[in-house]
Structure formats: structure tokens, C-alpha cells
Amino acid sequence: MPDCKREPLKTHPGEFLKVKKTTRKITFAVLGMLVLLASCREKDKGAAKTDVVMPDAKEPVNDVVQETQSDEKSEPDFGDWFMAQTDSAPVKSVIATSELVEAQFEGRYLYPPINILDGDFDSTWCEADKNGSGIGESITVEFAEPVSFDEIQIVNGFASKDYYEKNNRIKSITLTQTASKTELKDWDSEKSQFNVETKNHFQQKLYYLEDGIPDWQPIKFELPQTAQTITIKIDDIYKGEKYDDTCLDDIRLLYKGRVIPFTNVPELKSLQEENSKLMLKEKSGESFKKQFFDLFRGGSSIYLVGDNPKNIITITRYEPDGDRIYLLDGFAKLIEFTNKEALLEELENSEEEQGRYLYKDVSEDEKVPTKKYVLVGYKLGDYRTSYELGNYRILKHENIDYVETTTAIITKISGLDTVTLNGTSYKVLSDDLVDDWRYWEGP
């Protein structure tokens, strides 16, 4: 590698007399020097960009680099980063490792995790660590789709009246963000399935919050972030004057100085308050689990059909006597089977490749329905995700690299025919009513 120091050119006045005789030599020398200087400049530029490497970025590199991770964590794969929408943050669930419910007042005073999204300083989330002041407790917000932002603002403690000083405040947090995106690509006619592309990435870093500020505190990022889950874990606290409960009042996301509005908060707040009271009455959740498994009517699976008949959720028992379950979604078409001719017409007019593929099977008598409904399309599953029944909720555990996040689906059961998941109502069909002809898609 040549030396890139720019030494001054040393020439003697008499040497200029030889210019005409040595024009070609000087020309090559000058060209060589220009190449060397250009190489040095490129090297300087490269050195300045060593921590902003983003393969295959379509926009300027400086617009898409994420925050540096803590020293203990390895660098994320920037190739899986993607920019999402910034218009709104549709809230799907909020879950905490614990939540304070004033049992002595029969649940009159509730501090559910959804309170951190309502923008009301008079409501808060408080942890309920029985053995300490909440260090290690966490709260996770899940969105229905990924959201991009460049700032998070936090209201620390219980920022109402004198409760701020009386309760613990958070001194430091570990902030974890994960995002995932699965896209169906072209139809593979040889394999009779869709090609699937999945992108996953995470971000994890330690932050410190100031004390004595019962108002918004900013955490600003140099470049945009993308998240579908945001987890705040309590690492250290400022001690309260009276109570040993640690509280977090509110958070909000911003992009370029504009607050990104949370949606679906009032509906989830009503559900969580009802859920908190149910958990207070029965801490084990055994009654809920019995109700839930009664929906299966002795079978192994149930199918949940919402207002959009093409969005079918399948829940399958992992084992007959355990709490673990499989939960699969995907694009599907539910066809009520009356006769073969009507079914063939439905499949022939299907917009999906898979439906037309099944048409041939049915027309040649290779497939004949035996139940009331036929389900065609595909179902999506992911080996990184597992589910289990909690207390009036379904807990979802998801791994991205070594980071695990837990989110919750608040569940309400109405008889044997209707179940509500995070406020959305579904009709329940047991597997003795459905012929499931869908294809499996996913990583």
C-alpha cells in the first residue's frame, strides 16, 4: 500500500529548462500523483464510514443505520433492516411481567400496562414484584404492523400529584425493539406452494432516565428505528419516599418531531381492566383454561372465523393435557360444502393459484370433502414462535436471534361458539366441521 502522506514537491529552478524534453515523463508522473491522491481521499472517506455499513441499501446509508448496541451484544444484521410506515402505531397488545392491583380495595384501583399509552398522567403502570422494588420487571408493547420512528419519549414514575415522589421511579432501562416482516412471493408450481421471504431484526441498548422530571423525557436516535415490539426492562430505580412500587406513566413515539398516534388504545384499556379484575378473582387461571379447551369439543383443533372470512386463525393443542398450543394464521377461503358441482365452481373461480390447483384434484375425484366446510389457501407458521395459555390470555413467545419477547392476546370466551381475541370477535368452528386443505407456508 503506498504511503498516503502528501509531501511537498521539491524542484530546482533550473529543472524547468528541461520541460520540453521530458514532457511525456512529467505527464505520466502527474497522472500517477493524481491517482495516488484520489486513492488517499477514498481511503479517508472509507475510514469515516466504518460504522455505517448497510448492504443493499437503496437510500443514503446515513438514513438507515440503527443505534449501536451495548458492548455485550453482537451487531444486528443490517441487511434485515427495513423502513416501515410512520402514520400510526396500531396497538395489538401490551403485557407486563407483573401489574399492581389493589386487592384490598377489590380491584377498584388498577394499574394495567395499557396505561402507558393513554397520554393521561393520572393513570400509570406499576409493577407488582413481591420480592423487591421491580428491578428485572418489564413491559412490552406490540403493534399490529411494524412502525418506524426516530424518537421515544417517556414519562417516568407516577407523574400525578405527590405520587411521583412517593413511588419508585426508573433510573435505567434496557430498551429492546424487534421487527419482523414476512412476504409471499411468486407461486412455485413445481412445489405447489408460495415462495416466502422473511426479514427479522432486533435492537437492544441501555438508557438512563433523569429523576425529578414528571414530564416527557426524550430518547433520540440518530437514524430511524423500526419495531413491531418494544420492551422496556427495569434495570435500576430511584427509591420512593413511601411505597416500594416502581411506576412508568407514559410513552410515545415520534418521527421528525411529529407524534405518531397510538390507535386501538381505548378498546384494549377496557379489555385489560376487565382482565385484571378476572385475574384478581382467580389467580391460577384454571377455570379459564377449562373454558378454553371446552371449545375444542374433544378434537385437536379449532378454527376462528372473523368478519373477514379470508383471515382464518387455527389453534391446535400441542398435547392433550398441557397448556401449550399452536396458533397459525394465513390467507384462506372457507367454502361451505353442499355438493361437488358447487365446490368445483368455487375453486374454478378462485383468485388464488392454490384454489385452481385443487380444482384438478377435486374434478378427478382424488379429493372429496367429508365435512361441512372446506378450507383452502395457505397457513403461516414460524418455528421461532410458541404459544401457551395464561390467565385469561394467550401468551406468545417469539425469538429473534437470542432475544425473546413475550406478548399477550387478551382472550374472552362467550359460550362454545364465540371467542374474542384482543377485542376482535370470532366464530368458533371445531375440527369435526372443517376439511382443512390449506398448504403450509413459512420458514
Image (tube, rainbow, N blue to C red):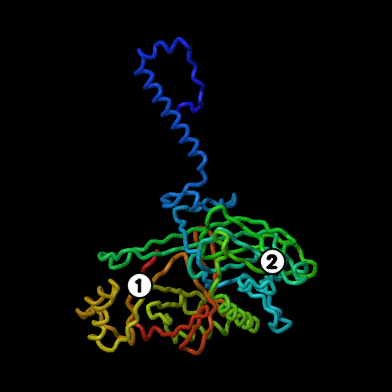
Which amino acid, by three-letter code, is at mark 1?
Tyr
Q: Quadrant of residue 254?
A: bottom right
Q: Which residue is mark 2?
A: 134
Vertical relation: 128 (above or below) 201: below
Disc 2 secondary structure class: loop
Q: CA distance from mark 2 to mark 1?
A: 43 Å
Measured as percent of width and height from the top left, residue 12 is found at: 48, 12
Q: Name the quadrant of the N terminus.
A: top left
Q: Is 333 positioned to the left or the right of 121 in the image?
A: left
**What x and y, as percent, mark residue 198?**
41, 61
Q: How many marks?
A: 2
Dot 2 or dot 1, earlier in sequence: 2
Residue 138 point in image, percent of width and height: 62, 66
Which residue sits furthest left? Answer: 364
Instruction: Please identify the quadrant where the C terminus is shown.
Output: bottom left
Q: Position of residue 280 (x, y in %)?
A: 65, 81
Rendered image: mark on residue 277: none
Q: Is residue 193 left or right of residue 41?
A: left
Could one spot residue 302 in this view of the protein? Answer: no
User: Hey, what amino acid is under mark 2?
Assistant: Gly
The vertical placement of 339 against 385, above or below, is: below
Q: Is residue 405 left or right of residue 212?
A: left
Residue 33, compared with residue 22, is above or below; it is below
State which quadrant residue 24 falls in.
Answer: top left
Q: Residue at x 52, y 76 (%)?
A: 323
Question: Vertical placement of 283 versus 205: above or below?
Answer: below
Query: Quick one: 359 or 122, which is closer to the camera?
Result: 122
Instruction: Residue at the far right: name it.
Output: 241
Q: Which residue is mark 1?
A: 378
Q: Residue at x 42, y 82 (%)?
A: 307
